[in-house]
């Protein structure tokens, strides 16, 4: 008779709980023969949760980085104040501006991007433009992502 | 053209919602450029020039340069993308910036030619109001106004020739009249020494051909009329009865040198006849 997979999951999770450890954080030595998702960050520094607001000035020429999301998940809201054209995207080169490699910003229309940790947002323009830039940290997205990866890993879904 | 020319980028970085090109003309060949994209173009409220050409990059037309003319009654409300990088006009291979220039003839060296009734030995002075080019480039979609302000040119004391000039003296005063449909001339003399003064007015259409003495077509709008001291002269010029002109000028001929300023002159020009 085959094992009931739900029973197996339950036993594993119960064992974790009775071990006295939190479901969030270090859960024992990793099995090196199995690829694992990085564990979620258990603590957050104050500086990493700040909101950052400013005005970004584009310049003509090559693609520039308008936001570097290496450290954490963030929501980036952009509002183009001038006529443009200005394109934003996640590729390292999104020129020519009107080629479609990026997404064109519309004047006075806010647009919000949720940038995953490790991703970057690039911008390209044909000249000087003003862009309102708001960067809001959403560190809980990283914890949720980590939790989901851990759960999926334990039930055998890679 | 003014130097340095107005820079649209400074308007954009300064937070303005538009670039206003507001400058006096040096010649009708003045040309200005903008590196900013636009959500519309319109003639500015203080423009003397009534028709302005806008050129922008368009890959589908000859020379990659498309062109549109704007006037007080016809602004352009569409989006024009800046093409400073990658778009080149042909065959100059220059960046496809937006270009702005007047579509009117203007001669900064104009001199009045219709002075047949003025003695050749009279002392003369010519004052010319230089036309203003006023164009607004909008950075965001905005309601676009479509009319120009009326303009009043007022001289409380006239800049007449002084001694050692010898009378009779004549003063010519020219104002721009591009696209205007109405003008009102008011003149009240303030004479000294028992002098007399006569007033006449002419319409000017500039010509591209001809030598210095033949640079315009002139039409008499107000025939020579004597204006007694202390009285008020008033007359109107309308496009429906008198025609349209690039400029109009008033000629005041005084029989003697003046020490009291000669009088007050007011010229109003408008886009509306009524």
Image (cartoon, coloured by chain):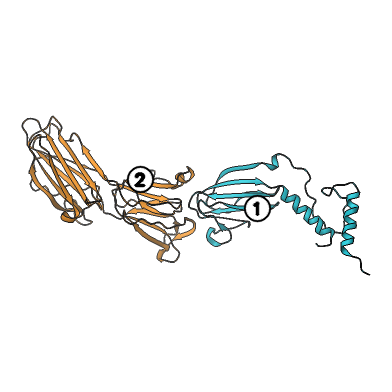
The secondary element bearing badge 2 is classed as strand
The circle on residue B224 is none
**Where is residue B29 drawn, in percent x and y?**
31, 52
Q: Farthest residue toward the left?
A: B194
Q: Which residue is mark 2?
A: B22
Q: Farthest residue toward the right?
A: A1
**Where is residue A90 drawn, in percent x and y?**
63, 56
Looking at the image, can residue A31 be seen? Answer: no
Looking at the image, can residue A51 be seen? Answer: yes
At x 79%, y 56%, the residue is: A149
Whether labels 2 and 1 belong to a single chain: the reply is no
Query: In the rendered view, does A122 fall on the left or right side of B75?
Result: right
Q: Chain of mark 1?
A: A
At x 84%, y 58%, the residue is: A154
* Image quarter of residue B4: top left
Taking B243 as reference, is B185 above or below it? Answer: above
Q: Colour of chain B?
A: orange
The circle on residue A114 is 1
Query: In the rendered view, does A94 fall on the left or right side of A144?
Result: left
Gap in Å between the C-alphas at discs 2 and 1?
A: 43 Å
Q: Colour of chain A?
A: cyan
The secondary element bearing badge 1 is classed as strand
Disc number lying in front (2 or 1) = 1
Query: In the rendered view, does A129 fall on the left or right side of B266?
Result: right
Q: Nearer the viewer, residue A91 or A11?
A: A11
**Where is residue B52 drawn, in percent x and y?**
33, 54
Query: In the rendered view, does A136 fall on the left or right side of A16?
Result: left
């Amino acid at each position: 008779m085959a094992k009931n997979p739900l029973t197996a999951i339950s036993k594993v999770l119960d064992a974790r709980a009775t071990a006295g450890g939190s479901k969030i954080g270090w859960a024992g030595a990793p099995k090196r023969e199995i690829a694992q998702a990085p564990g979620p960050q258990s603590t957050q520094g104050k500086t990493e949760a700040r909101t950052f607001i400013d005005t970004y000035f584009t310049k003509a020429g090559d693609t520039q980085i308008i936001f570097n999301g290496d450290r954490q998940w963030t929501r980036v809201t952009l509002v183009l104040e001038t006529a443009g054209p200005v394109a934003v995207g996640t590729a390292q080169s999104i020129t020519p501006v009107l080629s479609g490699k990026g997404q064109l910003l519309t004047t006075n229309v806010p647009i919000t991007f949720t940038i995953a940790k490790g991703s970057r947002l690039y911008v390209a323009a044909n000249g000087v433009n003003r862009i309102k830039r708001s960067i809001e940290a959403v560190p809980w997205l990283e914890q949720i992502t980590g939790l989901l990866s851990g759960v999926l890993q334990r039930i055998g879904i890679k | 053209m003014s130097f340095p020319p107005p820079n649209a980028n400074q308007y954009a970085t300064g937070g303005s919602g538009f670039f206003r090109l507001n400058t006096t003309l040096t010649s009708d060949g003045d040309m200005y450029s903008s590196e900013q994209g636009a959500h519309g173009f319109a003639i500015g409220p203080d423009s003397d020039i009534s028709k302005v050409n806008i050129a922008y990059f368009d890959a589908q037309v000859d020379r990659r340069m498309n062109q549109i003319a704007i006037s007080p009654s016809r602004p352009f409300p569409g989006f024009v993308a800046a093409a400073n990088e990658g778009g080149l006009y042909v065959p100059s291979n220059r960046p496809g910036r937006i270009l702005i220039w007047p579509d009117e003839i203007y001669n900064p060296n104009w001199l009045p030619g219709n002075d047949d009734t003025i003695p050749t030995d009279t002392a003369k002075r010519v004052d010319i109001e230089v036309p203003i080019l006023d164009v607004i480039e909008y950075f965001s979609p905005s309601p676009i106004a479509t009319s120009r302000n009326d303009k009043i040119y007022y001289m409380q004391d006239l800049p007449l020739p002084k001694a050692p000039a010898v009378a009779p003296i004549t003063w010519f005063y020219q104002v721009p009249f591009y696209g205007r449909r109405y003008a009102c001339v008011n003149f009240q003399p303030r004479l000294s020494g028992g002098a007399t003064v006569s007033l006449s007015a002419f319409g000017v259409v500039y010509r591209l051909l001809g030598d210095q003495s033949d640079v315009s077509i002139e039409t008499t709008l107000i025939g020579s009329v004597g204006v007694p001291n202390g009285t008020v002269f008033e007359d109107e010029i309308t496009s429906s009865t008198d025609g349209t002109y690039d400029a109009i000028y008033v000629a005041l001929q005084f029989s003697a040198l003046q020490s009291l300023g000669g009088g007050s002159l007011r010229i109003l020009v408008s886009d509306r006849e009524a």
